[in-house]
Amino acid sequence: MSSAHEFSAIARVNGVPLHAAAAALTPEELRQRACTELLRQAAQAAGLLEASDQATPDGVLSEAAANAIEALLEQRLKMPEPSEEEGRRHHAAQARVYCSGERVRLRHILFAVTPGVNVVALRQRAEAALLEVRGDDGTALGRFAAAARSLSNCPSGAVGGELGWLSVADCAPELAREVFGRSEVGVLPHLVHTRFGLHVVEVLERDPGKPQAYEAVRPAVLMALCRQTYVTSLRHYLSVLAAAATLEGVDLRAADTPLLQ
C-alpha cells in the first residue's frame, strides 16, 4: 500500500518541475503529474503545442495543452476494433460483470478530503483504521461499526457505517469499480479513493443479479475491450516516453497508468 510522502527535492521531467518546493504529493499523484508532463512535452515535440506553453506548479494543464495531448494520443495510439469472437470470449470469461441488477450491501468509514486537510496525516489515519478493522482472516470481526461511529466523516457513521443495498448507479464510479463484478465479501484489503476522500470498505452481502446474453450487452463488452486495448497502448507509449526522458524524483517503472484511474 502506497503512502503519501513529502518530497524535499523537486521532482522533474527533462528538467521541468512537477510541483512547488513545499508540496506534499502521494506517489500516485506524482506519477500522474509525470505522465501528464511526458505527454505535454511529446505534444510540443510533435508540433501540436506551442513551445511557449509552460507546466504549472499545481499540475493543471492549459486548455491548449489538454487539446494537444488528446490530438497526440489520437495520432499515436492506433488500435484495432475488437472482433465478435473476442467479444464473445470476453463475455464468457467475465459473465458476472455483465449481470443485470447486481447489488451489494456495504458499510464504510469515510476519511473526507476537505480544503486545507493534511492529506498525509489523513491517509495515515485511514490506513491505521483499515488495519484495525481487519482480522487475521480478513474479516471485520466486531470492530468495524465502532470505528465507523468514532472516525467516519459520513452520516452513516452513526449506524456503524451501513450504506445498505446499492447498485452501480448508487455509487461513485471509483467505488463501483472496486466492489461490483466480483465475488469476494469482507473488508477490502486497501483503501478506496473517491472524489469524497478515502474509504475503508466492507462488502457484507452480494446479490449477483441475472446473467445477460452476449447480444444484450454486446456494446458494453466491445467498449470494455476497446478500453483494455487503449490502456495497454497508453502504458506502452508512456513507457517509451519515460525511457527516453530524464526523470528526477519520480519512478515510473512497473507503475499502473494513473491517467486512467
Image (tube, grey):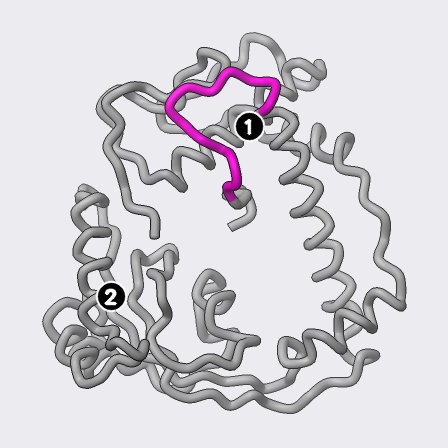
Number of dots carrying numbers: 2
Query: Which residue of the protein is positioned furthest toward the front in this rendering?
Result: 136
- Position of 156 compared to 10: left or right? left
Q: Which residues are magenta?
A: 243-255
Q: Magenta stretch mostly in which secondary structure?
A: loop
The residue labelled by disc 2 is 130
Q: Residue at x 52, y 75 (%)?
A: 180
- Judge whether residue 241 is colored magenta: no
Q: Is residue 96 above or below residue 30?
A: below
Is residue 248 positioned above or below 122 on the image? above
Q: Is residue 21 above or below residue 148?
A: above
> Depth-wise, is mark 1 or mark 2 nearer the camera?
2
Image-based side of 198 in relation to 124, left or right: right
Q: Nearer the viewer, residue 88 or 223?
A: 88
SS for tag 2?
helix
Q: Nearer the viewer, residue 89 or 150?
A: 89
Q: Which residue is mark 1?
A: 63
- Image coordinates of residue 143 in percent, x first then y, are 16, 79
Task: Tell me what residue is drawn at x 82 percent, y 68 percent.
Answer: 87
Q: Which residue type does callout 2 highlight?
A: Leu
| Front residue (pair 95, 195) | 95
**Residue 39 on image: x %, y %:** 59, 26
Q: What crowding class fits label 1: few (fewer than 14 Cα within 10 Å), some (14-19), or many (20 or more)? A: few
Given the image, on which type of amino acid does mark 1 rest?
Glu
